Image: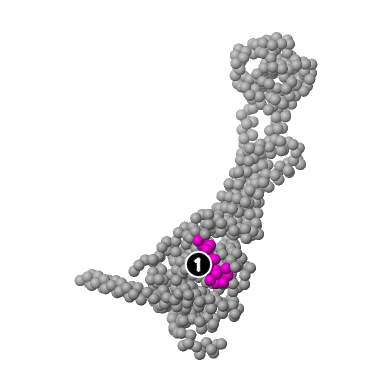
């Protein structure tokens, strides 16, 4: 007996994509409902991430401002008013934002002169190391380097009173600090206990966020799965017909997986935008508008957004696995049933 | 000894089968052969015998109608000879191939190319235009889209709908939709057209047009048409009527033989 039966070929992904896209477009209203489920879940995730970023950024800004104020009051404690005084500034390593702010404030306070070594800044005259300390009321040593190539005695040479304020508590200089120099650090080091407490608080906060966001994402997955299951039962005649026309189970499965990943992608994109903008606007009412938008770390925000889109799309595909299997196992004869 | 006996019996059975196969291909005129087809549905402990051993040959180019009250096993038998379901016992050969032997890929291939399905509710894919509906089985068969488009337009012309090719099914009348469905069934030039109550959702006049179309297709393309129907006009147009009752083949007759009966109902 001659065997004339061949094996059905697998359709290229492009065809499934076309059919799937068209299905979504035509059933736009229904797709929109499913999409909005994803939008809500991802917007919630994103608003949590954005809210945290804003809170962190604002806290950082505040801490920095507090730091600068504290440094400034230390300066005043040493020399009284800055105005009319000569100030010398040496920089070892990189300037922090707080260092810069402090310098700006010092320059703004109207000293006779600010002489600087090792950096450039408006209102600061760059001088060689020999003339740095000349007649200066105060020497500020800023920057984050733990070790300086210079001698503290050279830096402070020519000062009437050798008062040095240092931004690093245990910075090491090329010469041992002698008793003629009064060197004070701006800050003491944070105690281990303080650090531990802060870490513990951060951990508890993170756990709470993960829990709430996790639950909301689970609800999203179930919502999408339910919507897709409905859509499968709604379409069983169409699926059966496709099988009668020669569609393989894998093709039906691909159709639903593509559909859900597109739904997930669209929903996540909208959700990310909504979830990022809403908390930014809301926090703008509570704080200054410029503070929220100005202090936002946009790089980190973008990475969080990309992550949320990936998560949203993956969850939508995850939600589609069962409905897609259900659809692909439908028997072709179901196309013959005349009632819906 | 007994072992040898068994062997010889086995041999002779196989020989019989081969001879039978040879006879079939010599005739070559049967497109579907159902031999002692039984189907049992199991629901828990309950066994339902939908078919109790139906044997029937369908000739190539024949227009056959299947009749039977609901619950008679008519639909089961219909699904069976269309390759939509496999028998519990017995054999169904479509174009001399035992469908029970086929894997899912081969079954899909068979449904795609050997059989064209026509449904009571037309079952056009609503999201696609008529042209795309007709092209769908061709793309399942791996035809490139240019070739498929050309062929689809040609077939749509055959059913008289070439100028409405780009319309969506929802924009067409029931009769037009059914003609698109027939065009789609013809897409891969199948040997068999399987129609389940094709006129069930159409008015009398449109139904007649569909019947005319079936007759035309049988005469011009030589395609075998099998319908499950209660439509008297369809029964009249068919070459043979198969009556299924209680899972058994009750009788096979020509419309003329059961003519008086039909007139009475008319």
> Which residue is found at the position 46% from the left and 69% from the top?
B190
> Is residue A67 in view from this perspective?
yes
Quadrant containing the N terminus of chain B in the rendered view: bottom left
> Is residue A336 in view from this perspective?
no
Q: Magenta segment, principal secondary structure?
A: helix
Question: Closest to the observer: A35 or A167?
Answer: A35
> Which residue is found at the position 50% from the left and 78% from the top?
B215
> What chain is tagged by disc 1?
B
> Which residue is found at the position 43% from the left and 70% from the top?
B86
Height in image: B130 above or below B29? above
> Which residue is found at the position 70% from the left and 44% from the top?
A277
Height in image: A139 above or below A304? above
Question: Closest to the observer: B209 or B39?
Answer: B209
Range of magenta residues:
B147-162
Quadrant containing the C terminus of chain B in the rendered view: bottom right
Q: Position of residue B47 (x, y in %)?
A: 45, 74
- Residue A85 horizontal side relative to residue A19, left or right: right
Residue, disc 1: B187
Visual colour scheme = one colour
Numbered marks: total:
1
Q: Position of residue B262 (x, y in %)?
A: 52, 87
In the picture as drawn, the residue positioned furthest to the left comes out as B1
Circle 1 SS class: loop
């Amino acid at each position: 007996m001659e065997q004339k039966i061949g094996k059905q070929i697998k359709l290229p992904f492009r065809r499934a994509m076309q059919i799937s896209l068209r299905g979504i477009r035509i059933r736009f209203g229904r797709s929109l409902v499913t999409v909005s489920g994803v939008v809500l879940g991802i917007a919630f995730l994103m608003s949590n991430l954005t809210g945290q970023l804003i809170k962190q950024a604002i806290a950082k800004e505040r801490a920095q401002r507090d730091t600068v104020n504290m440094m400034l009051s230390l300066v005043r404690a040493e020399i009284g008013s800055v105005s009319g005084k000569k100030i010398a500034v040496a920089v070892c390593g990189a300037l922090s934002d707080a260092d810069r702010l402090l310098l700006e404030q010092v320059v703004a306070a109207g000293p006779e002169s600010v002489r600087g070594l090792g950096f450039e800044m408006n209102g600061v005259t760059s001088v060689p190391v020999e003339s740095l300390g000349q007649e200066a009321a105060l020497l500020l040593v800023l920057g984050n380097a733990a070790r300086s190539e210079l001698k503290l005695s050279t830096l402070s040479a020519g000062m009437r009173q050798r008062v040095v304020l240092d931004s690093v508590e245990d910075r090491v200089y090329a010469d041992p600090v002698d008793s003629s120099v009064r060197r004070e650090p701006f800050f003491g080091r944070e105690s281990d206990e303080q650090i531990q407490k802060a870490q513990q608080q951060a951990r508890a906060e993170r756990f709470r966020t993960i829990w709430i966001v996790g639950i909301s994402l689970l609800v999203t997955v179930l919502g999408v799965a339910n919507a897709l299951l409905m859509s499968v039962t709604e379409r069983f005649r169409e699926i059966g017909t496709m099988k009668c026309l020669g569609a393989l189970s894998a093709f039906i499965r691909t159709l639903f997986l593509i559909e859900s990943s597109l739904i997930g992608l669209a929903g996540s994109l909208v959700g990310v935008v909504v979830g990022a903008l809403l908390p930014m606007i809301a926090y703008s009412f509570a704080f200054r508008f410029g503070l929220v938008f100005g202090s936002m770390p946009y790089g980190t925000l973008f990475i969080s957004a990309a992550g949320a889109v990936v998560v949203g799309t993956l969850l939508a595909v995850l939600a589609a696995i069962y409905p897609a299997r259900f659809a692909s196992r439908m028997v072709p004869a179901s196309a013959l049933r005349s009632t819906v | 000894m007994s072992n040898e006996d068994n062997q010889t019996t086995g041999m002779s059975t196989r020989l019989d089968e081969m001879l039978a196969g040879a006879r079939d291909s010599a005739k070559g005129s049967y497109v579907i052969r159902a031999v002692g087809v039984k189907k049992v549905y199991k629901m828990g402990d309950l066994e339902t015998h939908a078919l109790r051993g139906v044997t029937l040959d369908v000739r190539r180019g024949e227009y056959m109608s299947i009749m039977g009250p609901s619950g008679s096993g008519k639909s089961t038998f219909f699904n069976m000879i269309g390759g939509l379901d496999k028998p519990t016992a017995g054999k169904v050969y479509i174009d001399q191939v035992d469908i029970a032997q086929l894997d899912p890929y081969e079954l899909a291939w068979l449904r795609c190319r050997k059989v064209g399905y026509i449904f009571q509710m037309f079952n056009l894919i609503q999201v696609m235009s008529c042209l795309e509906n007709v092209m769908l089985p061709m793309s399942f068969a791996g035809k490139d889209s240019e070739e498929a488009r050309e062929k689809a337009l040609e077939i749509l012309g055959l059913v008289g709908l070439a100028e409405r090719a780009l319309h969506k099914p929802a924009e067409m009348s029931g009769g037009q939709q059914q003609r698109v469905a027939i065009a789609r069934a013809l897409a891969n030039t199948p040997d068999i057209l399987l129609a389940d109550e094709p006129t069930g959702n159409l008015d009398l006049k449109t139904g007649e047009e569909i019947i005319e179309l079936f007759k035309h297709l049988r005469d011009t393309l030589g395609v075998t048409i099998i319908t499950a129907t209660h439509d008297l006009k369809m029964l009249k147009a068919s070459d043979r009527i198969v009556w299924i009752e209680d899972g058994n083949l009750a009788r096979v007759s020509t419309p003329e033989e059961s003519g008086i009966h039909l007139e009475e109902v008319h």
